[in-house]
Amino acid sequence: MNTPTPGGEVAAALGELLVRSSRARLHRALTEGLGADIDEATYPVLSGLARLGPRTAAALACDIGLDRSVISRHATRLERAGLLSRSADPSDARATLLTLTDAGNTTVEHMRTRLADHLDRYFADWPEPQAQAFAHALRRFVDQGLSFEESPADGARS
């Protein structure tokens, strides 16, 4: 029997984590009780704007992998809830920027705290050094810029 490579193990684990139903369950848990307009459907819009900053619906759709019309519908709900505002895009008079309001940023911080608490409960059974090592290794993995355009080894050869 072949032992999977680290890349193979990570690929399999990411595949399981990224399944839509897993994401929806997590988003539902993070948004529970935060209001009728904040749910697993609007979570990616809030989270995306918090990570990426003001964006047009088209740009955000590309960034987070949702259809532009879906982004626009969710933005309307979030604007109604006071979590998002729309303004003219200074670089394109035809476009509208979506921006989190102070209330939107506060809501995202609340959801991020919930997420960290949720993850900390999983790590409670891990030895502290192992949990810290995993967190540092994952941060390093992400910081290396996993773009899939060029592997780290390819970049080292150029």
Image: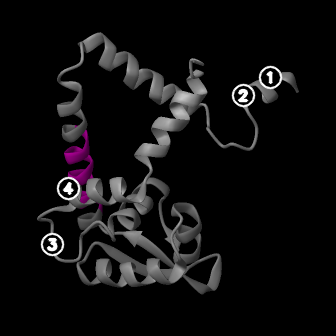
Q: Which mark is residue 29?
A: 4
Q: Quadrant of residue 120?
A: top left
Q: Residue at label 1?
A: 156
Q: Residue at label 3?
A: 35
Q: Is residue 111 magenta?
A: yes
From the top left corner, tell me how far across and down residue 57 is, in percent. 52, 76
Secondary structure beneath dot 4 equals helix
Q: Quadrant of the N terminus?
A: top right
Left or right? Give the position of 140 relative to 91.
Answer: left
Q: CA distance from mark 4 to mark 2?
A: 35 Å
From the top left corner, tell me how far across and down residue 110 is, in percent. 20, 53
From the top left corner, tell me how far across and down residue 22 is, in percent. 34, 53
Residue range (magenta): 105-116
Instruction: Give neighbour class at mark 4: few <14, some 14-19, many 20+ (Cα, 10 Å).
Output: some
Q: Residue at label 2?
A: 152
* Viewer-proximal residue among 11 and 91: 11
Earlier-in-chain disc, 3 versus 4: 4
> CB under 8 Å between callouts 1 and 3?
no
Q: CA distance from mark 3 to mark 2?
A: 43 Å
User: Seen from this angle, which residue lies furthest right?
Assistant: 158
Mark 3 or 4: in front is 4
Earlier-in-chain disc, 1 versus 3: 3
Secondary structure beneath dot 2 equals helix
Q: CA distance from mark 1 to mark 2?
A: 6 Å
Q: CA distance from mark 1 to mark 3?
A: 49 Å
> CB under 8 Å between callouts 3 and 2?
no
Secondary structure beneath dot 3 equals loop
**Image position of 150 with respect to 114: above or below:** above
